[in-house]
Image (cartoon, rainbow, N blue to C red):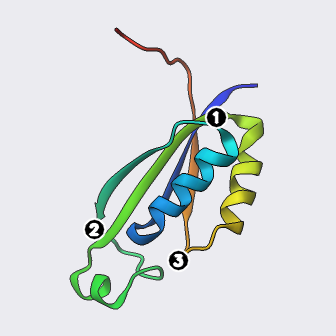
Amino acid sequence: MADVLLTLHCAAADAETIGEALRGALRSPVHVRAEAVLGLDFSDATTAEQVTARLDRRAIELVLSEAAVPEALAMLGRVRRSGAVRWYTTQVLERGRVA
């Protein structure tokens, strides 16, 4: 089965909890980076974010087998968090490490 890059977009306050839960459940390295989203959809935004039209989000990424995605999403549903999480997968065609 192919590997995919699972990308989650969540509120900044939820990133550490989600990242730690994913790492523990899936035994996979998790990458977290800060993002400023100049949004159009403010359904997940705080009042301050709505006023500035700028969402403070974190992108969480990890590579896993396509078969493990349902497990990751189920675990995500069990994690205590303050807001919604948006996600998508991207097929990984190649990967490696250059030393």
How crowded pointer 1 is (Cα within 10 Å; few <14, some 14-19, many 20+) is rated as many
- What residue would you read off at disc 3? 83
Q: How many marks?
A: 3
Instruction: Specify the amino acid type for callout 1.
Output: Leu
Q: Nearer the viewer, residue 78 or 48?
A: 78
- Residue 33 point in image, percent of width and height: 35, 50
- Residue at 70% x, 56% y: name it: 73
Q: From the image, which quarter does the C terminus lie in?
A: top left
Q: Secondary structure at mark 2?
A: loop
Work out whether mark 3 precedes mark 1 in sequence or the reverse, and give the earlier one. 1
- Residue 39 point in image, percent of width and height: 33, 71
For this orientation, the residue located farthest to the left is 52
Instruction: Specify the amino acid type for callout 3.
Output: Gly
Label 3, label 2: how many angstroms apart (C-alpha)? 18 Å
* Labelled pair 1, 2 in contact (Cβ < 8 Å): no
- What residue would you read off at disc 1? 64
- Residue 24 point in image, percent of width and height: 64, 47
92 left or right of 44 in image = right
Work out whether mark 1 precedes mark 2 in sequence or the reverse, and give the earlier one. 2
Instruction: Specify the amino acid type for callout 2.
Output: Leu
How crowded pointer 3 is (Cα within 10 Å; few <14, some 14-19, many 20+) is rated as some
1 left or right of 36 in image = right
- Residue at 36% x, 74% y: name it: 40
- What residue would you read off at disc 2? 38
Label 3, label 1: how many angstroms apart (C-alpha)? 24 Å
Q: Secondary structure at mark 3?
A: loop
Of labels 3 and 2, the one closer to you = 3
User: Can you say whether 48 is above or below 41 in the image?
Assistant: below
- Residue at 39% x, 59% y: name it: 58
